[in-house]
Image (spheres, coloured by chain):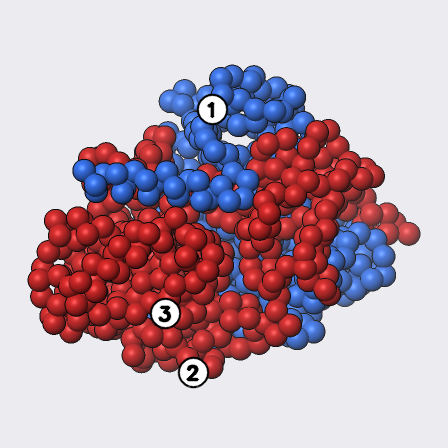
Chain colours: A red, B blue
């Protein structure tokens, strides 16, 4: 059977060709394998490694040593693991690497992680369910310093089918070292909104996810090395913290409002973010209350000093601020390193009679918590 | 300066927190660095590795040994490298890993690679230029066996601005182990079309990129291990080769034509693919000439035996076939493992008076060639 031989050759040669740059020549690992009982088996091919650890945010006791088996495949089975979506990777002789058996990756400037989904017996709010799905659009817009900016834009189910309808917009800012893809690929904001909307729990909305590290993108497009993350301390860095705010007001919002059916009113614009993106959110929101009507601050804060120095009018006019902000959301995990400064921020809001809503969860500075924060706060937006 | 301290703490603690799963605790590498003279420096942090190789399709002599320097950072500088976009990775004690310093990755089921862009002095046709940009949409559609399918959909510049205009559609199928993202993230089909359209060289079109390994997606959604790639020989495998064709006709095309402004005529539908996706393309096209009016076969072929067994009417009615196919494109590199079978396929077309156009390049089964094939063939579609 020449046909068979062709097919067979074809497949084998494909594998060989793809090894034109270093690939495992097999055996292929099947990782992660989530079992009925919610235990999970991980495999990593590393015939020559001295030590391979599994490292994941589901491992409360820290990294777990994997055992080397036949054909140089390291294995471990852990759990049962509580249903959630967790970042993890392998530490191969001290170096963190993705799981080659897993296509679900953590988009990030610095580290390489993979994503484990331990499904609920019923799919959780952040899992893909059999409901109408929105779409997620990768957009390119004219940005600062003649650079081209990147946006990931979620449009809700029915957006295309209802060309006369306009929607409110939630601007959602990535955290330190995350990219414009992270809220989509790790936060599952699209599944969360598809599911909330299907249950009538959230308003259909557009979500716009920029890349928070504007300076790094500009440097990259000019073939220059990336500057340090703008969260770091320096005058230049503080200026960079402000770049995203400038880009939002000058470029991103006008681009979205001329290319999407966005409601062009402050009450229909919300801004939120995680970690450094949450800090950028607070600065952009309090600095532009004429533009934004709602705030979602996830695992971030502004210091009383920042509030007094830069946004004194907020505390001085609580009635006006409360009238302007349809939602002022603050959330953090009680073991998050941002917990103390977030409590300090909430105390500042209390002391100045600024109304807010929020959620204090257990856990740390994790995407498990960010998903919880989104599931709660997205139900409150634009209502 | 409490403010400074907060900022500083904030940044440092972010890094610490993100190391909740194994991350380089710094020093951070700056990799790849493309220098003025087109030489490129690669860095990889691996303090405990015995041997680190740089492996890339720009290395004609095979992998290059990197040298361990201070702080456990391995380095090498290679080139000058001819302007192009190349997959590469590091081989750390025999294991292929991505470049943690690089956010541009190769989406794939099996291996983890990064993408190096060596820009032209003038940006090449596959590079981002300062022209109007289309957008790239991630869509979810109801697929076979009650599964949810994934599509990446390119819409041309001006698509949203011209709501009364409809566009032809190019269905573009991923190759062995590639995903629905690969033609976008590695093929840069969006930049190629943005640039061709800006220069009046290509018709504005929609490009629909499905995931070619339907069985693997269905298995994944049922929590089962992925079956072998359908390119492998077996009855079950042949049936799986046909799954994408069924999904295209039953689900994907109807989904696109009800959710996008697609011209619903066979002359305005083209199908193309690379490697296994090219094989699926030929079967789907020759099996559904009432649906498709153009074919783009990149580094793939159908054997004379397949053509005679399954599509004898093609060779028997050359005038009709030639009248039905506005474009029948065949291209391959002359050192591609598919070169002999592609020549055999072209000989079959010649022997049966089936008209075709194409490109035989130097080089192998690479994405450098796929980009060339797209740049040429996209200029011929729908004209």
Which of labels 3 and 2 is toward the front? Answer: 3
Residue A200 bears which disc, if any?
2
Q: Residues within 10 Å of mark 3 (few under 14, many from 20)?
A: many
In this view, the residue in front, B281 or B103, is B103
- From where the camera sits, is residue B134 visible? no
Residue A377 bears which disc, if any?
3
Q: Are marks 3 and 1 in contact (CB under 8 Å)?
A: no
In this image, B176 relative to B234: left or right? left
* Residue B87 to residue A284: above or below: above
Which of labels 1 and 2 is toward the front? Answer: 2
In this view, the residue in front, B253 or B14, is B14
State which tag comes first along the sequence, 3 or 2: 2
Same chain for the residues under marks 3 and 2 in the image? yes
Real-space Cα separation, disc 1 to disc 2, in angstroms? 53 Å
Q: Are marks 3 and 2 in contact (CB under 8 Å)?
A: no
Residue carrying label 1: B40
Q: Residue furthest bottom?
A: A200
Q: Secondary structure at mark 3?
A: helix
Residue B274 position in % (x across, y down):
63, 49
* Residue B246 to residue A313: above or below: below
Q: Chain of mark 2?
A: A
Which residue sits at x=36%, y=30%?
A225
Q: Residues within 10 Å of mark 1 (few under 14, many from 20)?
A: some
Which residue sits at x=26%, y=55%?
A344
Q: Chain of mark 3?
A: A
The picture quadrant where one finds residue B150 is bottom right
The picture quadrant where one finds residue A274 is bottom left
Which residue sits at x=61%, y=21%?
B64
Q: Chain of mark 1?
A: B
Same chain for the residues under marks 1 and 2 in the image? no
């Amino acid at each position: 059977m020449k046909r068979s031989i062709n097919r067979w050759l074809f497949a084998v040669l494909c594998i060989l060709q793809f090894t034109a740059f270093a690939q495992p020549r097999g055996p292929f690992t099947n990782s992660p394998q989530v079992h009925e009982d919610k235990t999970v088996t991980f495999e990593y091919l590393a015939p020559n490694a001295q030590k391979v650890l599994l490292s994941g945010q589901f491992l409360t006791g820290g990294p777990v040593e994997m055992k080397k088996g036949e054909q140089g495949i390291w294995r471990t089975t852990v759990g049962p693991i509580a249903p959630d979506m967790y970042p993890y990777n392998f530490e191969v002789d001290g170096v963190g690497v993705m799981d080659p058996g897993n296509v679900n990756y953590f988009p990030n400037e610095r580290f390489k992680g993979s994503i484990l989904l331990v499904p609920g017996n019923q799919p959780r709010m952040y899992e893909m369910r059999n409901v109408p799905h929105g779409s997620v659009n990768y957009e390119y817009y004219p940005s600062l310093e003649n650079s081209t900016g990147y946006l990931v834009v979620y449009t809700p189910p029915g957006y295309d089918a209802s060309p006369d309808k306009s929607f409110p917009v939630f601007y959602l800012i990535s955290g330190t070292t995350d990219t414009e893809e992270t809220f989509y690929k790790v936060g599952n904001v699209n599944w969360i909104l598809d599911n909330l909307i299907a249950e009538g729990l959230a308003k259909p909305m557009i979500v716009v996810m920029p890349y928070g590290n504007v300076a790094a993108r500009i440097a990259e497009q000019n073939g220059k090395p990336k500057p340090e993350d703008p969260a770091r301390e320096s005058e230049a860095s503080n200026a960079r913290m402000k770049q995203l705010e400038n880009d939002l007001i000058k470029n991103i919002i006008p681009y979205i409002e001329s290319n999407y059916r966005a409601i062009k009113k402050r009450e229909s614009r919300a801004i939120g973010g995680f970690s450094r993106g949450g800090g950028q959110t607070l600065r952009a929101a309090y600095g532009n209350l004429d533009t934004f009507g709602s705030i979602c601050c996830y695992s971030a804060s502004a210091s009383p000093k920042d509030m007094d120095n830069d946004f004194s009018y907020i505390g001085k006019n609580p009635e006006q601020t409360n009238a302007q902000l349809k939602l002022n959301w603050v959330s953090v995990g009680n073991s998050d390193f941002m917990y103390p400064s977030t409590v300090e921020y909430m105390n500042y809001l209390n002391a100045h009679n600024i109304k807010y809503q929020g959620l204090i969860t257990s856990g740390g500075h994790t995407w498990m918590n960010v998903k919880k924060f989104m599931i709660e706060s997205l139900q409150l937006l634009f209502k």
